[in-house]
C-alpha cells in the first residue's frame, strides 16, 4: 500500500503538469477518489487469487496519495 500511495503522488504531480484544462475541483476530487477506490474495492471483493487482492489494495492506495497532492496544490494556490 505504501507503493500505491507513492504512485498516487507521482500520478497527481504528473496529471497537474500534463492537464492544462480548467476543470471544477469537485469533479476532479470525485474522479481522483472514486475511480481508484471503486476499481480497487471491486478487485478485492471479487478476487479469487492472492495477487488480485494485492493488486486491488495497490489500486485502492493510489487514491489517498493522488488526492493529497491535489489538496496541497489547491492550498498552495490559495483556493
Image (cartoon, rainbow, N blue to C red):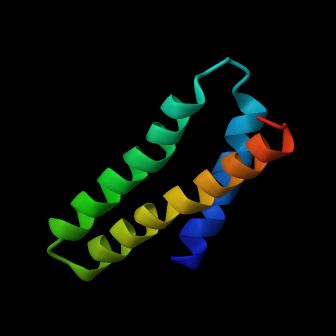
Left or right: 62, with 6 as reference point: left
Picture layout, residue 24 above or below residue 65: above
- Quarter-wise, where is residue 16 in the image? top right
- The residue lying at 74 percent from left, 47 percent from top is 13
On the rendered structure, is 50 left or right of 27?
left
x, y (%) of residue 57?
39, 71
Q: Nearer the viewer, residue 55 or 42?
A: 42
Q: Farthest residue in the bottom direction?
A: 50
Please provide percent x and percent y for residue 60: 41, 63
On screen, residue 43 versus residue 12, left or right, reads left
Residue drawn at the location 78% of the way across and 46% of the way down: 75
Q: Residue at x 31, y 53 (%)?
A: 39
Image location of residue 30, percent across then percent down? 45, 39
Q: How many marks?
A: 0
Picture quadrant where residue 17 is located: top right
Which residue is the extreme one toward the top? 21
For the residue pair 29 and 41, the one nearer the viewer reads as 29
Question: Residue sitting at 41 percent across and 52 percent down?
Answer: 36
Residue 21 to residue 16: above or below: above
Quadrant of the image for the C terminus?
top right
- Direction from residue 31 to residue 43 in the image, left or right: left
Residue 38 higher or lower than 40, as above or below: above
Amino acid at each position: 500500500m505504501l507503493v500505491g500511495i507513492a504512485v498516487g503522488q507521482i500520478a497527481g504531480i504528473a496529471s497537474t503538469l500534463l492537464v492544462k484544462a480548467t476543470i471544477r475541483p469537485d469533479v476532479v476530487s470525485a474522479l481522483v477518489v472514486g475511480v481508484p477506490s471503486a476499481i480497487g474495492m471491486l478487485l478485492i471483493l471479487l478476487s479469487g487469487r492472492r495477487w488480485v487482492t494485492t493488486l486491488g489494495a495497490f489500486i485502492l492506495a493510489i487514491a489517498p496519495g493522488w488526492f493529497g497532492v491535489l489538496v496541497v496544490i489547491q492550498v498552495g494556490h490559495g483556493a
